[in-house]
Every structure is written in C-alpha cells, then in structure tokens.
Image (cartoon, rainbow, N blue to C red):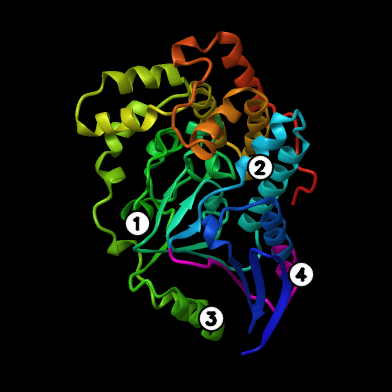
C-alpha cells in the first residue's frame, strides 16, 4: 500500500492511501466534536485532495465506535461571545460553512462512513458527501433549538431536499426535523435518503480497507441499500407531519401541534418543550427559504441568522443549560412563541431573505 501522510493536526488525521484521500476525525474523548482547528484541517485536506490528480476518492471517517461527530465547539463560541468579541465565533462559522460547501461540491466521489452518533456539525461533515454509509450504531439529530441557535452547516438545505421524500412533504418534514431535534434511526436515514448504504456487519475497518485497496465499488459491495431498511417512524407518520408542519408561520404550526391527539403528538410536544421560541420562529423561516435556493445561499442565510441569534441572550443561556451546567433549565426570552413580537419576526424574515454577510472564501 502506498501511504503518503499529508497535513496533520492533533485531532484530524489526513492520509493519501493508494489514490484514496482519507480524513479521520480523531478526538474520541470529545466524541469527535469539531473545534476550529479541526474545521480548518478538514478544509485544508479537501483543498489538497482537490488539486491532486492522483486522488480519485475521498473517505471521511472517525476514530472510536461511539460517535462519528457529536457537533461543533459552541462552548468556545459562547465564551468569546460573552466577552463582547464576536469575531472568533463569526470566523469559526464562516470557515465551517465554507468547508461544508467544499465537501458538497467536491469534484470526485466522497464517502462518509458514519458510525455512531452524528449531531449538529457532524451532519455537516457527512450529509454533504455523495455516498453516506451508516452502521447499525448510527443515529443523527440536529438539536440546535435547545441552545438558542438555528439549524446550520447546510442542513436547512439538506432537510428540505431529501431525495426519497415526496416533494409535497419535503419542507414540512424539514421543519419537523429542524425544530424537534428528532433522532433519526438507521431506518429513517435509509428511507429518507440521508443515508445511501448500510454496513450491516458494522466492520468499518474492513470497509475502509476495501475502499483504499480495491476502490469504491468493492467497498460498497460490503453494504446493502435502502431496501434493507425496516419500518421508518418518519414514513409511518409522514402524512401527519406534512399536515402539521406545513407553512412558514411557526405560530400556526404550534397551534396544530398543541391541538393534535395521539401518542406521536405527545412525543412531538415533549421534543419541542426545551426549544427557544425565537429559534423555532427562525428555523421555520429559514427552512422555507432554503427549500427554494442553492446550498450556497442557504449557508449564507444560516450564517446571517446565526449571527443575529448569537448576539442575543438566548444563545449563551441555551449553551449554558445544555453544555455547561447541564441542568436543561434554560430561561429564554421571550419565553413562549406567543410573546415573540411582530418586530422580532420581521427582523428574522429580513435576515434570512437578505443575508448580511458572505463567506470570505466562497467556492
């Protein structure tokens, strides 16, 4: 095997192995959560592989079986934001969203081998790959509502363009996934198209070896397709989700959720309980916007809306409650959707429709 190390960082291993570019997230004690250094290392690796004619396939994978990537380093963003200096956080998110776009537009085949938990930023380094392989240990979620933030890393676009979901249900399902932090099971992932293949035996090392030594087709021969999926909870409840989460007015969606009956409706209300009301309003506006624009424009809207929310008290309070003190007792203001003012709704709408900032290095 021809092994060529490329750039290295403490928590991301980058190698060129017989024509395969391999990016391994290697921060298992932190569940491979992305800090700014890791984001830059992944971006640099993609740049290097893009310019290397000898690389004809790229694999993103992780060290450890518990998590592929549990999200991004929002605690450090909160710390700098609380000093009144928003530049470090702005820079991190700009670089991350540029990296997400680079992965989505990469010119040669990309494979994400998602083993274990993938949340938040973890979807940004998996859902944009052309081939998305999961194992029986995989589940995914976007839990930003509880930390006073919004669905980002391009997933506002991904969730509203799921390839196997009926077109008339895509936006409503996207809003549902963004606002509830619903945990997508392997069956949900395969049914919706968020995953393209299932590695049934869970032998990620053998999959990696096959991809490096024998190529993509040989690696995928070890997997099965979406026909192997069991019953998806999302599929079973899709009609209800479509009817309930349709539209760009969260207040109306909230009324439908509150009036609904049945076990699934009870579960949905419980999932929504920790959410920041302004995040719910913002995510609904954002998902409806991202459904009709390019990924690049969706990322720009995510950045603009994220900047708006980070400069308000709910973001540091939400991160405190979920990740710092872990008491899950955030005090948001406004405390209910009914208290969100028309001026706040209009500010969110203007921010989403006309992003105030663009990435420094658009690709």
Q: Earlier in the sequence, mark 4 or mark 1?
A: 4
Q: Quadrant of residue 105?
A: bottom right
Q: Are marks 3 and 2 in contact (CB under 8 Å)?
A: no
Residue highlighted by disc 1: 186
Quick check: 90 left or right of 166? right
Disc number lying in front (2 or 1) = 2
Quadrant, the N terminus: bottom right
Q: Nearer the viewer, mark 4 or mark 1?
A: 1
Along the line of sight, the residue nearer the viewer: 17 or 85: 85
Q: Is residue 361 above or below residue 301?
A: below
Q: CA distance from mark 3 to mark 4?
A: 20 Å
Circle 2 sits in a helix, a strand or a loop, which is it? Answer: helix
Question: Which of the pair 115/281 is nearer the observer?
Answer: 115
Which residue in the rendered view is the most extreme toward the bottom?
Answer: 1
Part of the protein shown in magenta: 46-65
Q: Earlier in the sequence, mark 2 or mark 1?
A: 2
Instruction: Say whether disc 4 or disc 2 marks the residue closer to the N-terminus.
Output: 4
Q: Which residue is mark 4?
A: 51
Tell me if label 3 and label 4 are in contact, CB under 8 Å: no
SS category of the residue bearing label 3: loop
Q: Which numbered dot is residue 76? A: 2
**Measured Cα–Cα span from mark 1 to mark 3:** 25 Å
Residue 8 lies in quadrant: bottom right
**Is residue 151 found inside the magenta-colored segment of the image?**
no
Q: Position of residue 178 (x, y in %)?
A: 46, 36
Q: CA distance from mark 2 to mark 1?
A: 31 Å
Q: How far apart in space, not on screen, are marks 4 and 1 (Cα)?
A: 34 Å
Mark toward the start of the polypeptide (3 vs 4): 4
Marks 1,3: beta carbons within 8 A: no
Q: Are marks 4 and 2 in contact (CB under 8 Å)?
A: no
Judge whether residue 56 is colored magenta: yes
């Amino acid at each position: 095997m021809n092994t060529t190390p490329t750039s290295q960082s403490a928590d991301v291993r980058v190698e060129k192995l017989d024509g395969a570019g391999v990016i391994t997230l290697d921060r298992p004690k932190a569940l491979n959560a992305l800090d700014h250094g890791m984001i830059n290392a992944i971006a640099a690796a993609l740049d290097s592989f893009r310019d290397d004619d000898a690389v004809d396939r790229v694999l993103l994978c992780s060290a450890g079986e518990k998590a592929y990537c549990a999200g991004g380093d929002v605690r450090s963003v909160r710390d700098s934001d609380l000093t009144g200096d928003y530049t470090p956080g702005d820079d991190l998110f700009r670089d991350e969203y540029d990296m997400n776009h680079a992965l989505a537009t990469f010119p040669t085949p990309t494979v994400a081998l998602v083993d274990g938990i993938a949340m938040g930023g973890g979807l940004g380094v998996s859902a944009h790959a052309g081939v998305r392989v999961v194992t029986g240990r995989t589940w995914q979620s976007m839990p930003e509502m509880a930390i006073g933030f919004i669905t980002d890393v391009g997933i506002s676009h991904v969730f509203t363009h799921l390839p196997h979901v009926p077109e008339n249900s895509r936006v409503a399902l996207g809003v549902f996934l963004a606002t509830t932090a619903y945990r997508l099971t392997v069956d949900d992932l395969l049914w919706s198209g968020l995953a393209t293949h299932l590695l049934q035996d869970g032998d990620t090392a053998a999959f990696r070896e096959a991809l490096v030594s024998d190529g993509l087709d040989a690696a995928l021969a070890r997997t099965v397709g979406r026909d192997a999926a069991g019953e998806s909870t999302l599929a079973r409840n899709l009609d209800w989700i479509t009817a309930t989460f349709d539209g760009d007015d969260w207040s109306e969606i909230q009324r439908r959720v509150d009036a609904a009956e049945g076990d699934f409706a009870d579960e949905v209300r419980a999932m929504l309980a920790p959410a920041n009301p302004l995040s719910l309003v913002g995510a609904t506006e954002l998902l409806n916007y991202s459904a009709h624009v390019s990924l690049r424009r969706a990322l720009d809207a995510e950045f603009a809306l994220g900047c708006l929310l980070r400069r308000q008290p709910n973001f540091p309070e939400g991160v405190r409650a979920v990740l710092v003190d872990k008491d899950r007792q955030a005090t948001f203001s406004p405390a209910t959707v009914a208290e969100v003012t028309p001026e706040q709704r209009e500010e969110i709408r203007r921010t989403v429709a006309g992003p105030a900032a663009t990435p420094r290095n658009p690709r």
